[in-house]
Image (cartoon, coloured by chain):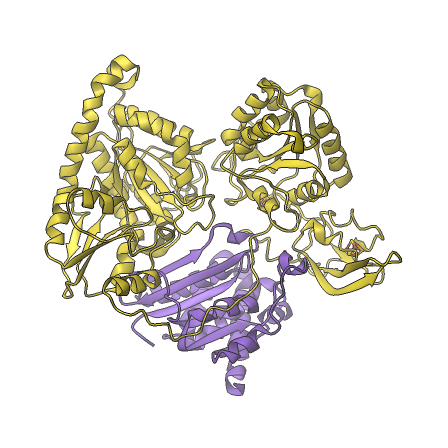
Chain colours: A yellow, B purple
Amino acid sequence: MPATQPVPAAARLFLSGNDAVARAVWEAGTRVAAAYPGTPSTEILEVLARYPDLYTEWSVNEKVALEVALGASMVGARAFCAMKHVGLNVASDALMTITVTGTEGGLVIAVADDVGMSSSQNEQDSRYWGRFAHVLVLEPADSQEAYAMTLAAFDLSERLKSPVILRLTTRICHVKGVVQTGGRSEHEPAGFVKDPRHWVMVPGNAKPRLPSVFQRETAARAEAEASPLNFRIDGSDRRIGFVTSGPTFMHVRDAFPDAPVFKLGLSCPPPLESLRAFAATVDTVLVVEETEPLLETEMKAAGIACHGKDVLPRIGELAPDVLEPAVRRLRGEAVPEPEHVPPQQVFPRPPTMCVACPHLGVYYTLSQMRNVLIAGDIGCYTLGAGHPWNALDSCISMGASMGTALGMDKGRGKVDENKKVVAVIGDSTFMHMGMQGLLDITWNRGNVTVLLLDNRAVGMTGGQDNPGTGRDIHGEETQRVDFARLCEALGVKKERIRVVDPYQLPVLFKALREETKIEEPSVIITNRPCVLIDHYEPAKSYLVEEDRCTGCGNCVEVGCPAIHVTRRDKEVKASGKEVDLSFVRIETSACTGCGLCVQPCAPKAIVHAQPVQSIQSVQFVRK
Amino acid sequence: MSQITNILVCGVGGQGVMTATEILAEAAISLGFDVKKTEVAGMSQRGGVVTSHLRFGRVVLSPQIVPGEADLLIGFESAEALRWSHMLRPGGIALVNAGRIVPPVVNLGLFDYPEDPVARMRALGLAVHAFDATSLALELGNIRLGNTVMLGACADRLPFPAEVLRDAVLARFGARKPQLVEANREAFEAGRRAVAGEAKAA
Ligand code: SF4
Ligand code: SF4
């Protein structure tokens, strides 16, 4: 059994939306829950894994997570999976058929849209998938609703024999609020009923099922019209009536406390008749939805006059500071300039790699190479696109580095003829979607050198486990994948697979030089763990001997955040050329002694320090 | 203060901004307030910008503080405090750690760190209480006491007794690391004293 955490009795708890969903999934008597970590959805499974009485797992990707959940639903168990918006794209292949099979045990899919794009490669509206797949979409507005709607979603799913999408946004997942919770109720699975016409989706079986999709949609429409999740608040100021979905409800209520509001909780399919009745009670209707004009379009198609994206932005969150000026404009009022302090210009502070991150060495080395095309991927190592390395030429989606690199290789013309193609991917990303790409590279004789950065963690989302760590979601030991043998099985020649230490810059550089020269697929696996995972052991820290430092700035180019420039200068060389000098200091309390910066320092100015204090850097502390 | 109290805590990923806000929230909850807390998280863990919004009152709807409506700005790092100054309402107060965290883009010479962020904030007409919380924490023996120092600094500017916040701090650390309770009590009081002096000087 998994490690358990004491489960508080029914209580008033301070929970994030993610915590609240997890709590409700457990209370609903769910037996199986699966996910692939992805901001902002990650914590749902992390929290759930600490509850007793249910099976939880990190899956290798979202499609597998959904399939696992579906399997459990088939045998009659309540099942759950979670993902971020781009994860549902990955899972969509399964989803589009589940829509035909339907489900048995309640199946809830939590999808977290990154509205405002705090950490994603795009901003997409997952509510489209509800329309596309003809399944219900519920949209909570805060933690309390996330909790209640998760419970409601299981009931709806079982009543309509359909998966239900719980659409969350960053502002639900990561907002904490007070939640009234309850206790768990058991749900014994009814058992699998052998029925190929239901579960075996060959055309002959699937075709007769198609009408059921639309019958279900009719039933869902009736649900939406009657559902207490859709309600209206009558206000005294009837000039504008707001139709809201998700967290925008709270923003609207905050900004316009006297306005009538129609709150959609079960927003797909939309309760058009109730909305029509609401529209008749106000002068103008404004639809406030993040991010696409879905409801707006559906209402207009049903002949309900409304405003929406003509006055509101299509990008980003619709918080009170965005709503107020937009509504003023709609009312034809002037928008006054705010009287308070104007925003101040301060340097950008993009996220950067941790002190001693093993990826530092890889990107430093890549940035020293000329004539390379570098296809990047999603994860901490995407940070290599930033300063000082600027070492990524692309980053599209999970695993895309493989295919993009192959395409670059096959598609390049005369100008790029002499360039080498390198693909960079992390261990978890490789297993998520990269393996197929590598297979394609070997099969089609691509000339690509793959850098497989095995840091034994899903680094970006906080160091979760994956098949490469040899531990499961509970931290318990399980089989560990052998990347060298895996790559060999995928068709890379044994002698073209190398395992190197990313802290040894000359070795890494040499390996890269050699492998990119050879016209064959090759893989360089780096083998140092992420510094944030529990068993990383810091070594003796370094300092800079000031009188030896020549200010060459080589160590700054490594990009370690523990190195600080103390003084800048200019020097005129004998050749008359002017060079910039940067004299540096190492933040000894932050340095963990990885030794990366020592290597490019020609005058050997970087030496071991006696530890000044044994406190880890602020960059390092794992929450 | 209005019906709802708005507190914006800002700093750099890894400084403990989120934990500090969480403790403030716990104090408010213990008094029966409705509370909402939100942050821009995501990749901020790796040295990026972190802001945490805390709102409490009888009923809280939107979790976000509208620019120009924060009663209190708690800046864990000076340049970050300057970056978020526009969030303060007229008459609001900023409590700023004068310590600096210089990012790689500044070390590379691509951008400048602002000359004197606190002076710039004062020039904007803001009421700023600034002190070096990082050095204070180091003097007390642990850089990680910095967030307790900052909490101590804001304790006398909340719509509830400072002791409620202090108890929330001690309860949090008492549960996790009992040996750190005394150090945190000291850090809290040190933060309190630091701005009490400043307030008179200002
Ligand atoms: S979390 Fe791990 S992998 Fe990511 S930047 Fe930090 S050390 Fe590197
Ligand atoms: S590499 Fe060595 S000499 Fe050059 S700036 Fe760094 S410490 Fe000074």
Q: Is residue A553 above or below residue B123?
A: above
The percent position of residue A241, horizontal first and vertical second, equals 18, 58
- What's the residue at 53%, 82% (across, down)? B198
- What's the residue at 45%, 56% (across, down)? B40
- What's the residue at 62%, 72% (across, down)? B115
The percent position of residue A126, horizontal first and vertical second, equals 34, 40
In-front residue for pair B61/B135? B61
Q: Is residue A253 above or below residue A26?
A: below
In-front residue for pair A491/B155? A491
Instruction: Please state if A316 lies on the left or on the right of A374 as rendered.
Output: left
The percent position of residue A489, horizontal first and vertical second, equals 59, 18
The image quarter containing residue A492 is top right
The image quarter containing residue B53 is bottom left
Name the quarter showing ligand 1.
Answer: top right
- What's the residue at 37%, 72% (across, down)? A338
Q: Is residue A309 above or below residue A465?
A: below
Residue placed farthest to the top in the image?
A204
Does the rendering let one see residue A121? yes
In-front residue for pair A514/A56? A514
Q: Is residue A429 above or below residue A123?
A: above
- Image quarter where the N terminus of chain A lies is top left
Does the rendering let one see residue A609? no
Instruction: Please state if A398 lies on the left or on the right of A520 as rendered.
Output: left
Instruction: Please state if A100 lies on the left or on the right of B165 as rendered.
Output: left
In-front residue for pair A620/A611? A620
